[in-house]
Amino acid sequence: MAQFAADGVPTIDGCRPAVLRLMADGKERQLRDIVHGVASVLELPGDVVAQKISSGQGRLENRVGWACSSFARAGLLHRPSRGMYRISEDGTTVDQRNLTEYSEEEMKEWATWRAYQDEVGERKARQRLESATELAGDVTAQSPNSQEIEADPLSVVSDSVDELNDAVETELRGALQNASPEFFEKAVLEVLWAMGYGGGHGEKQHLGKSNDGGIDGVIRQDPLGLQNVYVQAKRYADDNSVGSPDINSFYGALAQRGADRGVFITTSKFTPAAKLAASQFHGRIVLIDGIRLTSLMLRYGVGVEPQHEFVVYSVNQDFFEE
């Protein structure tokens, strides 16, 4: 029997085995068909299936959707095309256990899911570090005690939103890694452009495959091209970090063009030697790794779109003034 919440709808953990049971036939299905299938597998009554959350989405659809997205990140479901799901060999392995629930903690048996969770954890750690740095620089800021933080509903909502966006950023980085090198080179130019590096009269140019000598793109910040930002983009897998030879080569390419600054962007990470090499050029080379890149993409709205908006109301005191 699946694990059910107090509202009578299966929990996300309870939905997961039902999703795999349905998908065990190997067919491709859209989310709405999976929702209907899970309701059938679990023999849910109509009034339970009809429940809605505040956004208007079905409660069961919401939980099945989270189950499917977590399975996709763990590699238990494949996404062969947009909006479609199909079970993987690992998913079949879990289905054969005849589970009644399957938690995120239990999913850590899969390396892909562990890597995903580790990345989300690193994003949170970076956010905490940035927040601590900002707080240290604000002499007027007061640090609330833990009881105040726990009692503040807005903090709870804010933390939940941050957690959801961390997951989106992680998924976004995976999408960039699966894209073509040319697409990635153009995408990073769009990010820098959205950040305002082009100014009001600049222009961006993708150089890419043409004998670029280590330069993938350039943003000209003024009509005469007197201030240019050159870009090197490396679409690397997680096991392939950017090393110091790449940084030195990039600096050489900049020197050949008489350039004084450049941005090196990768979907993976920079080795400590690469960071040291960049620091020796006194800020003329900026390094952006995959985690920071996707964080910037969310901040400037590149490759993403708003999904939900939450409004918190307060009483309008002016309305009650007689």
Image (tube, rainbow, N blue to C red):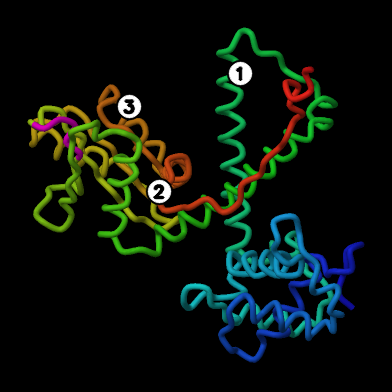
Q: Position of residue 163 (x, y in %)?
A: 64, 46
Q: Are marks 1 and 3 in contact (CB under 8 Å)?
A: no
Question: Quick check: is 293 in the magenta stretch?
Answer: no
Quadrant in which the C terminus is drawn: top right
Residue at (69% x, 44% y) in the render: 160
Residue holding disc 1: 135
Q: Is residue 185 left or right of residue 125?
A: left
Label 1 – label 2 distance at C-alpha: 28 Å
1 or 2: tag closer to the N-terminus: 1
Identity of the residue furthest to the front in this view: 322
Between 279 and 87, the residue placed more toward the observer is 87
Q: Is residue 319 left or right of residue 112?
A: right
Quadrant in which the N terminus is drawn: bottom right
Between 48 and 214, the residue placed more toward the observer is 48
| Above or below 309: residue 52 | below
Between 47 and 169, the residue placed more toward the observer is 47
Q: From which residue to which does the magenta span run?
A: 219-223
Residue holding disc 3: 279
Q: Nearer the viewer, mark 3 or mark 2?
A: 2
Residue at (46% x, 76% y) in the render: 81
Q: Position of residue 105 (x, y in %)?
A: 75, 59
